[in-house]
Amino acid sequence: MQRHFLCHQQDIVEGKPREFEIPMEPTPLSLFVIRYENQLYAYQNRCPHLNIPLNWQPDDFLSLEHTHIQCSTHGALFKPDDGYCIAGPCRDEKLTRLTLDLSQNDEIWLQI
Ligand code: FES
């Protein structure tokens, strides 16, 4: 198992997810971390509809109301706490959740 340092917990605030890219072979791993109801979640930055990135603008992953993760391409809406798609062309599919290690010094580490 590998660990990758992402940022500190205070760097991720409600309503402002943050995007990261981990160098990997053959392609980098693109992901984002979101704080929702004071819990931190990480998802791979891939929409299950077309397997493309969710966002068009940096760190832009939320619906207008900031209640859901939203795909910029066709507007699919995902629940922030489990990545489940509740509306759009990939309804009932899920984002790929990634494992975070929050154990040390308010740091956020990705486990892969
Ligand atoms: S690519 Fe995300 S909803 Fe179509």
Image (cartoon, helix red, strand yellow):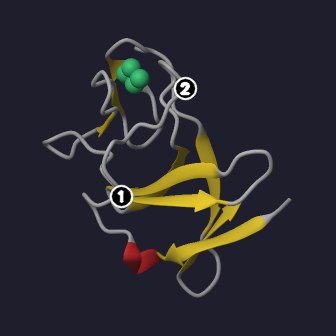
- Position in image of residue 27 (x %, y %): 71, 46
**What's the amino acid at mark 2?**
Asn
Where residue 35 sits, quadrant-wise, is bottom left
- Position in image of residue 7 (x %, y %): 52, 76
Q: Residue shown at 13%/43% (left/top)?
A: 65
- Position in image of residue 10 (x %, y %): 39, 79
- The mark closer to the camera, 1 or 2, is 2
The N terminus sits in image quarter:
bottom right
Query: How far apart are the two marked residues, 1 and 2, measured between alpha carbons?
Result: 20 Å
Q: Which residue lies furthest to the front in this view?
A: 26
Q: Residue shown at 28%/62% (left/top)?
A: 14
- Report which residue position mark 2 lands on: 51
Q: Residue furthest right?
A: 1
Q: Is residue 14 left or right of residue 22?
A: left
Q: Is residue 81 above or below residue 32?
A: above
Where residue 23 sits, quadrant-wise, is bottom right
- Report which residue position mark 1 lands on: 17
Disc tally is 2
**What's the amino acid at mark 1?**
Pro
- Position in image of residue 80 (x %, y %): 38, 42
Q: Dividing the image into four equal quarters, which quarter contains ligand 1?
A: top left
Q: Which of 23 and 107 is in front in this view?
A: 23
For marks 1 and 2 on the same chain, the one whose residue lies earlier in the sequence = 1
| Cβ–Cβ under 8 Å for marks 1 and 2 | no
Q: Residue shown at 52%/33% (left/top)?
A: 95
Label 2 environment density (alpha carbons within 10 Å; few <14, some 14–19, many ≥20):
few
Q: Residue furthest left?
A: 65
Where residue 100 sits, quadrant-wise, is bottom right
Secondary structure under tag 2 reads loop
Secondary structure under tag 1 reads loop
Q: In this view, does 48 lie above or below 101?
A: above
Q: Is residue 46 above or below residue 42?
A: above
